[in-house]
Structures are given as structure tokens and as C-alpha cells.
Amino acid sequence: MRTFDERVSRVAALRPAKRRPAAEEDFAARPVDESDALARRLGAAVGKNRFGEHLVVQQWFSSPEPCGLNPEALRLLLPVKPRTPRVPPSLNERLSDPSQWLFLDTETTGLAGGTGTYAFLIGLAWWESGGLQVEQLFMRDYGEEHSLLVELAARMASRRVLVTFNGKSFDWPLLETRYAMTRSVRPHLPETHLDLLHTARALWKMRLGSVRLTELERHVLDAPRMGWRRDHDIDSALIPQIYFDYLRGGPSEPLAGVFRHNQMDLRGLAALAGKILALLESAEPLGLADDPLDIFGLSRLVQRRGEASRARHLYESALGAGLPRDAGRAARRELALLAKRAGDFERANTLWSELAENPQGDLQEAFRAYEQLAMYFEHREKEPHRAAELTRKALASLARARGSRWAAFDKSRANNLEARFRRRLTRLERLETRQMHRNHKPLRSANSPAPSSAATESNQKPGPG
């Protein structure tokens, strides 16, 4: 349960903070006052603008290094659907320019967001001089929020591509709310916003389960190799309380851990961008992917982005590398559908046959495969007898499943599936009968006498009237 002081602190966020008068209109940094223990501990400067002051911590890191920005790989990261028009040239140019990228991560007074939540620490980073420049803006009390937001708007005005991790759902909506609450500071909207969380889910969720940035650093990015560890990192859930304690006059030492946590998040975000872009750019990702499941995730990502040919190649690579059972079934299904759309019916039928004959516990997948094979022989090969044979196999398999393993399935779905197969079988049997009659239609013998010329004339003579 929240204490009374915590509730008061959150309610205070609803009151517009007072401006602090300043002699200088533009941003400036001055040495910190000797009495500010936190600033001395962090090596911070005091930033000043027309709205007041705030702390600024700047540090350059040699890793992660700037990553290549291939336009085709970047297109797969954009929040667009496959059938939307091509990326505008101006946006494509900015995306491909490393100097336009701005990484952002915030530390806040609450994890739920809302109008009562402050972003008390705004972490920014960009590629510079072959490494990563990190800048952290910190408000020592609520009255410094205006100053903080003005500096954020200035950074975003010069770097138009915003890159976050879950920033579309949390960080940026929270900052937009804070801008609105100030009633005097206008945000500078990004030209495009790349939220890497969604791409990370597509690529690694099946293998890792959790795609928290710390898990990705441990299992995908190899953060210790790049020069940082989270061995003594603080729990994100504790960060709001650490800030509240500081506001009430508590020690500044725990806040140093919050700054370090924010720095590692920014470095992890930049490294993640490089890893994702390398995967999206590579024609042969086997050397970059740590597991066949990563290639499978990449296959699904490029498929959703409309890259059917590349998706087929990646699915084949993932299957060749050896996928677990469930992922292997899903890869065969998607690969079969892609092959069918491309007109490669031989490959599609091979995959459908594998799924039908070796369901490996997934009976629904087997029935879907039987149905696809029956459709092929009925509509493309015009062989209703083979389609009927496959449909009978599906019905027999369904009958066996009802008595033994159907408990895992929905009964109404089973009934619908059976009804659909029986309707198909009825139609196929009618087609079989018609085809049989056509094939066995009596033909006139070669020795039969030809009709007389009179009869022919009689047949050709027009009727009366």
C-alpha cells in the first residue's frame, strides 16, 4: 500500500510547476555547486535555460559501435503494412543517416503512467565519433520539469528518428502527457518512431519467452563482451521509491545506481538496433543467429512485411538447421502456403504430405494438410478420385481421434470439421461418377455403317415454318 507521502507526491504532479527565472535564454551548462553531492558523485553539470535548471550527465562509450543502416533492412523496421506505398525519399534519407538517430529511455515515478507520473530522468544517446554518446537529463525536484522538457525538445528537433524499447506504449505517451501538463512547453514530434520491442518479440520470443532488454543482453547481445554487466543492477520496480526518498532529503548514493541502470538500457538499446539490422540485412543469417528459432522468427517477420521470396528461403534454412517439433510444424505450414502462392505445387504438396502423415500430436495441422492436398487434386489435377481418397483418410483419422485423443480439441470444432469433409466427399463422389461416365461413353465402331446421304439430308433439312 502506498504511504501518505507517496500519494501526495503523485498528486503534486497535477499542479503546474513554477518557472525559475534565468538570465540566459539559451541552453548553457555551468559547474555544479559544491553542496550538490549527487552532481559531484556523477560528474554532472548544471544545465540552464529560460525555464530554469537541471542536472546534465554526459559520457561517451566506445561500444556499441555505430551500425550499418541499410535502406532495405530499415524498411522492415518501419511501422507500415506491406501494401502501403514506398518510404518517402526524405524519410528514407534520414533513416539511413546515423546522425539522425536518437535513442531514448526514461526513468519515472511510476510504472503505470498517467497524469500523476513524472519522467524524472530522461536518457538520450546517439552515435558519435565511432561510439555512443550518452546524455542524461535529471530534475532534482518537480520544479525543474519545464527545463528538462525544453532540452528534450531541442535534441529531438536535431535528430528526427526516435528509437525506443516499448517507447510507443510507455515512454513517449508519458512524455507527451508531461508536455501537455506544463501548458507552456511544446514537444518536437519525431518524424518516425522505431520501437524495437515489437521486432524483438517477433525474432526471439519463441526461444527466450521473455524479451526484456536484460534478457536480450544476456542471451542475444553478449553485453559483457561489449563492455558492461548488470551484475549489481537495481530492480526497475525500486526506482520510483529511490527518487521519492531523494526528494524527501534521503541519501543520493542510490540514485547513482539509477543513472547507471539508465546508461545500460541506452547502450543495450543501441546494441539491439545493430543486432536487428544485421539480421534483417543478411542474406544468410545462420552465422548471426544463435539458434534455428531465431531464423524462424526472422522468417515470420519478413513474411509479414511482404518479402515472400526471402521468407521461403529463411523457412528452408530454419528447417534445415533443425527446429523443435512445434516450430517445425509451423514452419512447414507457412512454407507450404508460400510455395503454393508461388506456384511451386510440388514443394507445397511434399510439405502437406509430411504434415498429414506425421502430425506429431497436432491433428488439426494434419486435417488442414489433408484438405490442402484434396483441393490440389480436385481443382488443379482434375483427379477427384485421388482427392476423395485423401478426404476418406482424413475422415478415418478424425474417427480414430474422437475415440482416443480428441479430448484436447474443441468438440464443436471437431463436428464442423467432420461436416466439412463429408460435404467435400459427397461432391467428389459425384465428380467421380460423372468422370467415369465420360470416360466410358460408348463410341461408334469403325465397322458400323455410316448414315445414308438421304438420312443426312433429312437431318440437315430445316424444320417447318
Image: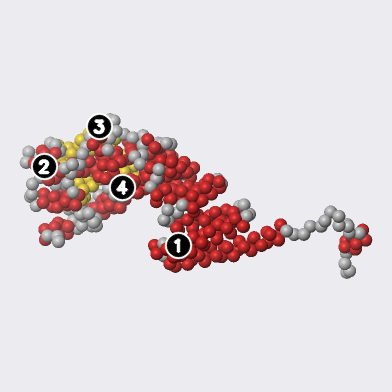
> How many numbered discs sit on the rendered protein?
4
> Mark 3 or mark 2, which is nearer to you?
3
Residue that lies at the very extreme toward the left in this rendered image: 35
Q: Amino acid at mark 1?
A: Ala
**Figure coloring:** secondary structure
**Of 80 and 299, the residue lying toward us:** 299
Label 2 packing within 10 angstroms: few (<14), some (14-19), many (20+): some
| Label disc, if present, on residue 208 of the rendered structure | 4
Q: Amino acid at mark 4?
A: Leu
Relative to 75, does residue 389 appear above or below in the rendering?
Answer: below
Work out how far the residue at label 3 is from the one at label 2, CA to CA, in angstroms.
Answer: 25 Å
Label 4 packing within 10 angstroms: few (<14), some (14-19), many (20+): some
Residue 10, given in percent of the width and then of the height, sits at: 17, 57
Residue at numbered disc 3? 62
Q: Please, what secondary structure does the residue beneath circle 2 have?
A: helix
Q: Amino acid at mark 2?
A: Leu
- Along the horizontal axis of the image, is 190 left or right of 456? left
Task: Please tell me which residue is depicted at 53% across the width and 59% down the height of the picture.
Answer: 393
Task: Please tell me which residue is depicted at 68% across the width and 61% down the height of the picture.
Answer: 434
Q: Please, what secondary structure does the residue beneath circle 4 have?
A: helix
Work out how far the residue at label 3 is from the one at label 4, CA to CA, in angstroms.
Answer: 28 Å
> Mark 1 or mark 3, which is nearer to you?
1
Q: Please, what secondary structure does the residue beneath circle 1 have?
A: helix
The answer to whether any part of residue 216 appears in the image is yes
> Mark 2 or mark 4, which is nearer to you?
4
- Along the horizontal axis of the image, is 78 left or right of 451? left
Work out how far the residue at label 2 is from the one at label 1, CA to CA, in angstroms.
Answer: 68 Å
Residue at numbered disc 2? 38
Task: Please tell me which residue is depicted at 64% across the width and 60% down the height of the picture.
Answer: 432
Quarter residue 293 falls in: top left
Residue 399, given in percent of the width and then of the height, sits at: 48, 64
| Label disc, if present, on residue 401 of the rendered structure | 1
